[in-house]
Amino acid sequence: MLKIAVADDEEKVLDEIETAISQYAFSNDVSVKIFKFSDGDSLVHSSMKFDLLFLDIEMKILNGIETAQVIRESDMCVPIVYITNYSKYWRSAYKVHAFDFISKPFEAADISRVMNDFMLSIKESQSETVSLITDKGLVMQKLDEVCYFIVKNKKSVLVGTTFSEYIAKEYLSNIQEKLSGDQFYLVHKSCIVNLKYVQNVSKDNGIVMKDGTWLPLSQRKQKDFFYRLSRQIRN
C-alpha cells in the first residue's frame, strides 16, 4: 500500500487532492492511504514514512519549501510534488529536488498525470535485474533491492540489499558496466550507491544510506553526485 501525504492550509484543497488521488487509485487498482496535514509543521513531526508528498508552498508556520528542507535532512529521495499558483517559488523548489509541479487551480487530470509518472517510475525501477557471480552460483539480483556495492578486496564486492548482504566474486568495474541508467552512481573508487536509498550527506562528507551505512564520497564527485541525486528524484 502506498502512503501519500498531502499538506495544504486550505481544507477545500486538501479534500480536492484527496478525492483526485482516490479516484485515480480506484480506476487503476492501486492501493493507497492518504494522510492530510493542514500545515508543514505537523507533517515534519509525523513519524510516518511516506512514499509520495503533495505540498502547498504558501502555508503558515512552515511553508512548502521550508517543510521540504526539513524532510530532506532525513530523506533525500521521497518524491515531492508542489501545488502552487506562485511560479516565483519554482527555482527554490528545485533546490529541494521537486518531483513535479501542479499549478492552482488544478483539475483531477493534473493529479492523475503526476500519479501516472510516479507509478511508472516505481514499475521501471522494480523490473530491472543484474547477474552477479557468487560462491553459490549466478544470482539474478533485482536492482531496486540493491542499496550499494562496496569493494572488499581485489575481486570481491559486498552487495548490500534491502534484505541482507552477500559477496559477489567480481570486480567493481565489471559490475558498474552492467548497470544502466542513472539509478546507480560511483561515489568513490571503492563503492557504487543506489541513489534511491541515499538518506543524507554527513558533516564529514560521507553518504549515509537509509539503513544507516556510511559510505565515502569523493570530493571531486560531490557536485556531480548532488546533480545526479536531484535528477534521479525528478525522474
Image (cartoon, rainbow, N blue to C red):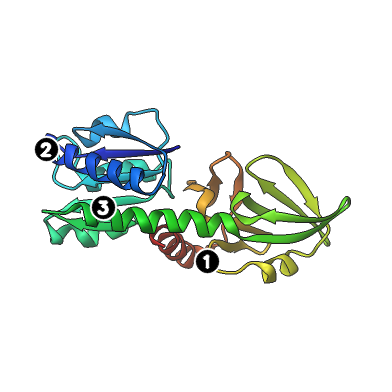
Q: Amino acid at mark 3?
A: Ile
Q: Position of residue 217 (x, y in %)?
A: 56, 57
- Mark 1 is surrounded, within 10 Å at the Cα level, by few (under 14), some (14 to 19) or many (20 or more) other residues, namely few
101 displayed left or right of 156: left
- Mark 2 is surrounded, within 10 Å at the Cα level, by few (under 14), some (14 to 19) or many (20 or more) other residues, namely few
Residue 178 visible in image: yes
Marks 3 and 1, the one that precedes in the sequence: 3
26 displayed left or right of 130: left
Q: Which residue appears at 63% of the width and 56% of the height?
A: 143
Q: Amino acid at mark 1?
A: Asp
Question: Circle 3 — which element?
Answer: helix
- Which numbered circle lies on residue 182? 1
Q: What is the quadrant of residue 151 in the picture?
A: bottom right
| The C terminus: image quadrant | bottom left
Question: Circle 1 — which element?
Answer: loop
**Residue corresponding to mark 2:** 12
Q: Amino acid at mark 2?
A: Lys
